[in-house]
Amino acid sequence: MRCALLYSGGKDSTLAALLLDPFYDVTLVSGSFGICDTDPARESASAAGFGHVTVELDLDVAHDAAERIHDDGYPRNGIQQVHEHAVETVASGDWLTDADGIDTVAAVADGTRRDDRVPTVDRPLAQSVEDRFDVDYLAPLAGIGRGAIDAMAADKLIVESGPSAEVPKADYEVELRALLRERYGEGAVADVFPEHTQSRVKGLR
């Protein structure tokens, strides 16, 4: 069974892949609006021993999310909007091509955690995705707290950590930051995105 797992290159989505690996043929999938490349995630996927595919997302969704983030003054709702779009896009299977060697998926997954405020996939959306696209939605970290995840990552992963603006990743925040910068200026990025630490997987222990 093939599982397409939304992937940024960070420790959470990599741990989710490792947990699912005994049960699925896991392919790591990075959604992209075409603003920034997904090479950091591809490199992390390769370092962790997984195949990687980039899936094109709707640029209009990114523009709407960036405007929403600017108007809200914080990123939560915009990032949630983008994540839901990415889950539905990957679940739809419209991105599948013979070139990727993947013709069907049985499940779509992500690395959302129990303690995450955003993004999340609530039960109604998960059931809707499963019903509309005939896939299973999986969130293997949804019952695991931050402390346990950090311990698991320290045991299994080689991780680079640093400020979110400096660690190369292939997540929604990178592209949304770029859109905000282009439309509203550098100050808008600093105003709405709080400083926080990001991780990028460099290999397995």
Image: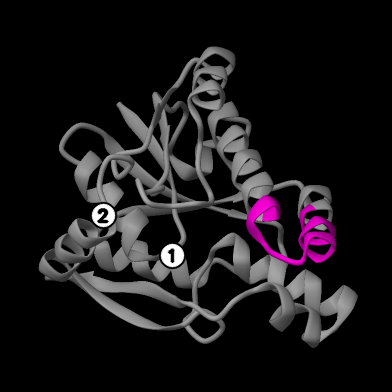
**What is the total number of numbered labels drawn onto the structure image?**
2
Res 154 label: none
Position of residue 42 in the picture relative to residue 77 (left or right): left
**Image position, residue 46 (x, y; %):** 32, 64
Q: Give the residue drawn at x 71%, y 57%.
A: 33
Q: Residues within 10 Å of mark 1 (few under 14, many from 20)?
A: many
Task: Measure the alpha-carbon separation of dots 1 and 2.
Answer: 16 Å
Q: Give the residue drawn at x 71%, y 62%.
A: 34
> Residue 70: within the magenta?
yes
| Secondary structure beneath label 1 | helix
Position of residue 74 in the picture relative to residue 101 (left or right): right
**Image position, residue 37 (x, y; %):** 61, 69
Q: Give the residue drawn at x 81%, y 66%.
A: 70
Give the residue pinned by disc 2: 15
- The magenta segment: 65-78
Q: Nearer the viewer, residue 95 or 186?
A: 186
> Residue 149: within the magenta?
no
Q: Nearer the viewer, residue 47 or 20?
A: 20
- Whether 134 is drawn above or below 157: the answer is above
Q: Give the residue drawn at x 79%, y 86%.
A: 187
Which quadrant of the figure contains the N terminus? top left
Q: Which amino acid type is marked by label 2?
A: Leu
Q: Is residue 95 visible?
A: no
Give the residue pinned by disc 1: 42
